[in-house]
């Protein structure tokens, strides 16, 4: 079972690796999409510094789609997604673990929520990135 999350320095190369890290995705096909150009410009403007990746995220909307259609297919599709959180604050995995443990002396606790730039889902369906 994979780790429940990972903390990665934001760089477009790291985001490209995270999005392309799947046996169902052809990395060269990912290069042809405009997603990466958009993400690079968008997160540069927001000054993103860190990505937290939830590796086995259960998305309710995706599960509804899965239950309504994909569960009936002969192809075995994944039921779980990856959720990516972007921050304009640089921190390590150790810093993030301290926040999760609720350590009141952790300097990242008060400001981490304020520095969250948002989140997105990585879903894989039929060799397409959604």
Image (cartoon, helix red, strand yellow):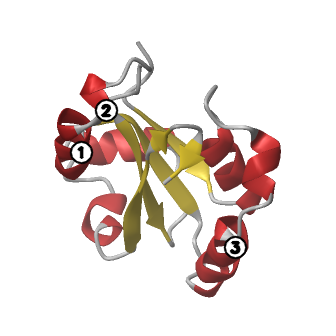
Mark 1 lies on a secondary structure that is helix
Identified at 32% across, 71% down, the residue is 111
Left or right side of 26 for 93: left
Dot 3 falls on a residue whose secondary structure is helix
Q: Which residue in the protein does label 2 denote?
A: 70
Instruction: Compare marks 1 and 2 and give the one earlier in the sequence.
Output: 1
Q: CA distance from mark 1 to mark 3?
A: 29 Å
- Density class for disc 3 (Cα within 10 Å; few <14, some 14-19, many ≥20) is some
> Which badge, 1 or 3, is on the more N-terminal residue?
3
Mark 1 touches mark 2? (CB < 8 Å)? yes
Residues 108 and 86: in front is 86
Q: Nearer the viewer, residue 98 or 55?
A: 55
Q: CA distance from mark 2 to mark 3?
A: 32 Å
Which residue is at a point 31% across and 76% down the rendered structure image?
A: 114
Q: Quadrant of residue 107?
A: bottom left
Q: Earlier in the sequence, mark 2 or mark 3?
A: 3
Q: Nearer the viewer, mark 2 or mark 3?
A: 2
Which residue is label 1 attached to?
Answer: 65
Please, which residue is most extreme toward the bottom here?
Answer: 45
Q: Read off the residue under disc 3.
A: 40
Q: Residues within 10 Å of mark 1 (few under 14, many from 20)?
A: few
Give me the residue at 55% from left, 50% from top.
129
Q: Give the SS element for disc 2.
A: helix
Label 2 packing within 10 angstroms: few (<14), some (14-19), many (20+): some
Quarter of the picture containing the N terminus is top left
Q: CA distance from mark 1 to mark 2?
A: 7 Å
Name the residue nearer the viewer: 112 or 25. Answer: 25
Residue at the spot 29% in from the left edge and 48% down from the top edge: 99
């Amino acid at each position: 079972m994979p780790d429940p999350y990972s903390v990665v320095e934001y760089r477009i190369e790291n985001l490209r690796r995270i999005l392309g890290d799947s046996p169902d995705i052809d990395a060269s096909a990912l290069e042809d999409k405009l997603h990466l150009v958009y993400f690079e410009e968008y997160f540069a403007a927001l000054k993103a510094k860190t990505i937290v990746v939830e590796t086995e995220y259960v998305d309710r909307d995706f599960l509804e789609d899965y239950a309504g259609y994909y569960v009936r297919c002969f192809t075995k599709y994944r039921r779980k997604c990856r959720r990516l959180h972007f921050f304009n604050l640089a921190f390590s995995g150790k810093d993030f673990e301290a926040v999760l443990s609720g350590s009141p002396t952790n300097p990242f606790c008060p400001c981490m929520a304020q520095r969250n730039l948002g989140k997105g889902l990585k879903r894989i369906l039929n060799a397409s990135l959604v």
